[in-house]
Amino acid sequence: MASKTRSSEGCWTCRLRRKKCDEIRPLCDACKDLEIDCLYGDEKPEWMDGAEKQKERADWLKLEVKRKAAHRRERRYLQGLELGLQSLDVSQAGDSDPPNNMVLATPAASSSASSHSSASHHIHDSTSESGGRHASSSGLSAFTTPTPASSTAEEYPSLQDPAVVDGPGIRFDEREMNMIVLYLDYVFPFLFPFYRPMLLDSGRGWLLVLFARNKALLHTALSLATYFFNVVINTATGSHDTCRIHNWAELQKQQDLALKELQSEMSNINIRGVKGYLAETNHVMASIIQLLTFEVAIANTGNWVMHLDAATELFTQIMKEHGTAPAHKGGVCFTMLLIQLGLKPYQYTPRNHPWSADQASLRFFTAFLLLFDTIASTALEQPPRLQQWHYHLLSEPDDEARKMLPDDEKEYKLPHINLQEFAGLQNWIVIGIGEIAALDAWKKEMKKNGSLSVTQLVTRAGTIEASLRAHISELEMPAKPDPDANMNPLAQYISHMSQNSLISSLMMEATGSINHVWAQATLTYLNVVVSGWQPASPEIRSSVASSMRMFMDLPSPGCLRTLVWPFTITGCMAAPEEEQTFRDLVAAMGPLQVFGTIPNALAIMEFVWAHRKEIEENADQWDIAACFKSLGGAALLV
C-alpha cells in the first residue's frame, strides 16, 4: 500500500525532520511530544536552504531531541524520587536535637566464635522481619544472591565475595575502561584531593568493586570522566571538533543511563523498603550522592535540593532500621552498620585489615553527605537535616570512654567519621557551621513570632564562638603526628610524578591553613548571624583581612576548589578595593575554574558588589543566606 503523501502545509520542523505532521496549530503533536520548537509560516526559514545551513540545523535538532528526551527522563526520575520520599517513614528526619539513646555497640567479651554468634543473633533479629535479602528482577537486588528468611547469619552471602564482584551483565568496552581509569587516575583525585586512603587499606580499589556492582554509580562516574575530558579538550590546542561532538553525545548517553538505573533502584526501594536491605540501600544512597557530586561539578543548580533530600532520608532510614543495638534498648550506632557490611558480615574487622568495599563506600559517602548537608543548611536557612547524627558520628570520645573501647577492631576507631580523612576538614568546623545554621534558623523563627530573646541569642552564640576559638588556638600549635600517616610502605620509593599528584601533595601539606580559612569564615558567618550585615565593622574587617592573607598564601591556585564556601563568605564581606583580588584568585585557577561551583561563587560576589547600595539600605533584610540565594535559587557551595 502506498504511504500517505507528506503534506506541504506541515510545520517546518517536521519538514526538516522528514516526518509527517498533523498540521495542528500553533503546536503540532509531534513537536509537542518531543518538546521542540514548532515553526509555521509561509516564508521558508533561512536555514531551510537545501544546503549547509539545513544540514547544520538538522544535526542540531537531532541533539535537541535527545537532550529533551533526557530532560523528560530526569523529570520522571525526580517525580518518582519525590513520591519515594513521601512513602518513606520520615517522622524523625527533621529532628535537630541528638537522640538521647545513642550508644556504642558493646564489644563482645572475646573475639571467639561465640561473640560472633551473639552479634549475628542481634543483627539478624533486626533484619529477618522483612524476609532477609530477597532478590528482585531489577535494580541492585538482581546482583545479589537470594537468601531465604530462615537463613542464619552465617549463611548470608557476603557481598564482598570476589565471585559476585563482576555483576551479571556488567561488562566494559574499551572506551568505558579508558574512562574508568581516567576517572580513578584524574577525576576522583581532582574532586576529592584530600582523600588518600592507605595502600594497606586497599587504596581506592573499593570504587572499582562498586562500579562492577552498581550501574548507576558506574554511569555517573563515566559522566564525570566524560565531562572532565570535554573541559580538557576545550582548552587543548589544535582541532578537536569531532572529538567534542562524540564526547558530548557520550556524556548525554551516560547521564541517561545513570538516571535510568537510579530510577530503577529508587523504585525497588519504594516497593520493598529499607529494612533488610542494608547493602542495597547503601548502594542507592551512594549513587544519589555521586549524582549530586556530578551536578555540583558541572554547576547544575536545578536539582541538588531534591537529591540531597533523598540521600539524607535514606541515611536516616538506614540508621533507624539497621543501626540499632537491641542490647541497648534500641540505641543507634554506626558500628552496627559497619559490621553488617564487612568482608565477613556480622564479625568485627581486625584493625590491620582493610575495609570491605561496602564499608569504605558507606564511610566515604556518609562523610560527604554530612558535609553537603551542613553547607546546604547555610543557604536553605534551616538546621542540617542530619544534625541529629553529628554528635554520634563526628565527636571525639572523652578519655574515659576511649579506655573502654577495644583497640584491635577497626569498627571502634572513633570518631566514626573523620572528615579530615575525606575532605581535609576537621570535624569541629562542620559541627560549628551546623550549630550556627541552626541558630540562624532559630533566630529567624523567633523574630517572626515576635519572641526573640537577644540574651538567649548572645548566650548561644557565645558558646559556639568560645568552642571555635579554642579549636583555632589548637590549629596554631604544632601538629601532632598522625600514627597512620606513614602506612604506605612504598612512600619512600614514590616521587611526585605528575603535576596532579604534586598539587594533591601540596594541598595535603596545607590542611592546617585550609582549616584555618574555614574556621575564620565560620566566625564571620556567626558574626553576621548575631549582629547582622555590617561589612564595615572592625570584627568583619579583621576577619576578611586575615582570610585574604591565607587565600593569597595557598600553595596552589587549585586549592581554591576546596574552599568555595569560605571564599564566598569572605568575598561577599570584602571592601570595594578588595574585589579585584578575588577575581584574580579565580583567574589564577586557569581553565579548570569552570569545573565546580567557583563560577557560582564569583557570580554571587559580583551580585553583592554590584548591589552594595541597595543592600546597605536594607541591611536588616540581608545576610549570608541571602547572598547564597541572590542568583535566584539556593547555592550549594562545595
Image (tube, helix red, strand yellow):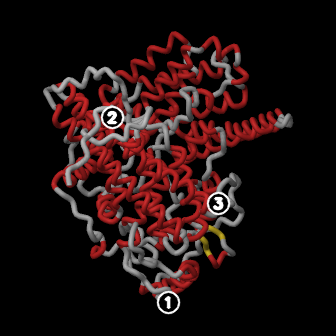
Is 257 located above or below residue 426 in the figure? below
Give the residue drawn at x 60%, y 14%. 612
Residue that appears at 62% across and 67% down:
332
Hey, which quadrant is residue 190 in on the image?
A: top left
Identify the residue at image location x=65%, y=57%: 93
Pick the quarter of the image with the N terminus: bottom left
Tell me the kind of residue under disc 1: Ser
> Which residue sits furthest front?
1
Q: Which residue is mark 1?
A: 150
- Dot 2 crowding, Cα within 10 Å, few <14, some 14–19, many 20+: many
Give the camera-side residue of 108 and 347: 347
Q: Which residue is mark 3?
A: 90
Callout 3 secondary element = loop
What is the number of the mark on residue 262?
Answer: none
Q: Is residue 171 visible?
A: yes
> At label 3, which amino acid type do we have?
Val
Q: How much space separates mark 2 and mark 1, taking CA atoms?
A: 65 Å
Q: Position of residue 346 (x, y in %)?
A: 47, 78
Residue 60: % across, % down: 27, 33
Which of 11/635 is in front? 11
Give the residue number, with chain letter if any, for mark 2: 10
| Position in image of residue 405 (x %, y %) | 55, 69
